[in-house]
Image: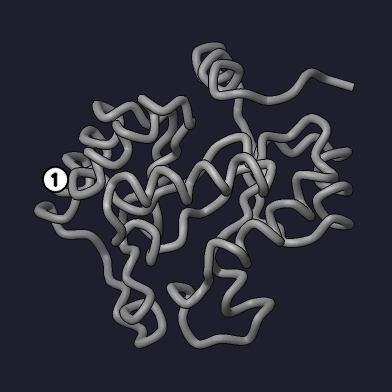
C-alpha cells in the first residue's frame, strides 16, 4: 500500500508533472473501492444534501450530517486524502465558531483537509483555518447552486477569467494548498 496522500505529497506530484485524482463519494463501500483503485483524494461534498438526502439545496446540510458521511468515507480511506466540504451555514458564523465547527469535521469526521467555497471573500477564513493547522482546499468559479439548477451557467467572459484568477490567487495567498475550479 502506498503512503497516505497529504498536501505535501500532492505538491510533489504536481512538481513532478504527475496527475492526481479527486472523486466525490459519500459512503464507506465506494470509498474503499476508490481508495484501493488508487484515487488520491476522496471528497465528501455538500452535494450529499441533494444526491443522498433528497433536499433541494446543498446549503441545507449540517455539520453533524457532514461528520456522519465523512466518518463513513474516512473509515475506508487508507491511502486517499479525505476532503470534507465546510457547510455554508458554518462559513456564516463568527470566526471562532467557524474554526470550532471545522475542527469537528476533522476530529469527529476524520477529515484530512476541508474544502471552502470561495477565494478573496473567504481569504481571512482560509488563513485562520490554516493557522489553526487545518489544510484547506479552496473552490472558486461558478459556485451558485441556484444558477446551476436554473441553467444559468455560461461561458466565461474575459472579465470572468480575470476575476477567477484573482479569486484563485487570493485563496493561494491565504494558504490554501489547492484551488479547485468549478464549471469553468
Closer to us: 64 or 8? 64
Q: Residue at x 28, y 36 (%)?
A: 171
Residue 131, given in percent of the width and then of the height, sits at 36, 25
> What residue is disc 1 on?
162
Instruction: Give the quarter of the image for residue 36.
Output: top right
Q: How is the image coloured?
A: one colour
Q: Is residue 167 left or right of residue 132?
A: left
State the image quarter where residue 143 is shown: bottom left
Q: Residues within 10 Å of mark 1 (few under 14, many from 20)?
A: few
Q: Position of residue 93 (x, y in %)?
A: 30, 58
**Secondary element at image label 1:** helix
Task: Describe residue 81's horizontal placement relative to residue 35 as left or right.
Answer: left
Where is residue 16 shown, x and y percent of the image? 56, 12
Query: At x 19% / y 49%, what residue is drawn?
Result: 121
Q: Residue at x 31, y 55 (%)?
A: 141
Q: Is residue 139 above or below residue 107?
A: below
- Where the N terminus falls, by quadrant? top right
Foreground: 156 or 79?
79
Q: Residue at x 62, y 44 (%)?
A: 22
Depicted 155 relative to depicted 130: above or below: below
Q: How many marks?
A: 1
In this rendering, is residue 167 above or below 68? Answer: above
Measured along the vertical axis of the image, is residue 174 above or below residue 32?
above
Amino acid at each position: 500500500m502506498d503512503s497516505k496522500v497529504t498536501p505535501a505529497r500532492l505538491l510533489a506530484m504536481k512538481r513532478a508533472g504527475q496527475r492526481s485524482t479527486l472523486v466525490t463519494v459519500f459512503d464507506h463501500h465506494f470509498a474503499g473501492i476508490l481508495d484501493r483503485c488508487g484515487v488520491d483524494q476522496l471528497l465528501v461534498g455538500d452535494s450529499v444534501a441533494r444526491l443522498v438526502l433528497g433536499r433541494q439545496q446543498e446549503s441545507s446540510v449540517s455539520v453533524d450530517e457532514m461528520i456522519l458521511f465523512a466518518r463513513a468515507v474516512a473509515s475506508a480511506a487508507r491511502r486517499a486524502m479525505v476532503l470534507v466540504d465546510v457547510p455554508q451555514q458554518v462559513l456564516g458564523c463568527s470566526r471562532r465558531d467557524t474554526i470550532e465547527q471545522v475542527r469537528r469535521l476533522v476530529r469527529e469526521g476524520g477529515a484530512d483537509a476541508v474544502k471552502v467555497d470561495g477565494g478573496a471573500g473567504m481569504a481571512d477564513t482560509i488563513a485562520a483555518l490554516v493557522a489553526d493547522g487545518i489544510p484547506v482546499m479552496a473552490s472558486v468559479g461558478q459556485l451558485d447552486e441556484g444558477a446551476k439548477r436554473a441553467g444559468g451557467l455560461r461561458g466565461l467572459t474575459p472579465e470572468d477569467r480575470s476575476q477567477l484568477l484573482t479569486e484563485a490567487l487570493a485563496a493561494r495567498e491565504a494558504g490554501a494548498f489547492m484551488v479547485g475550479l468549478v464549471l469553468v
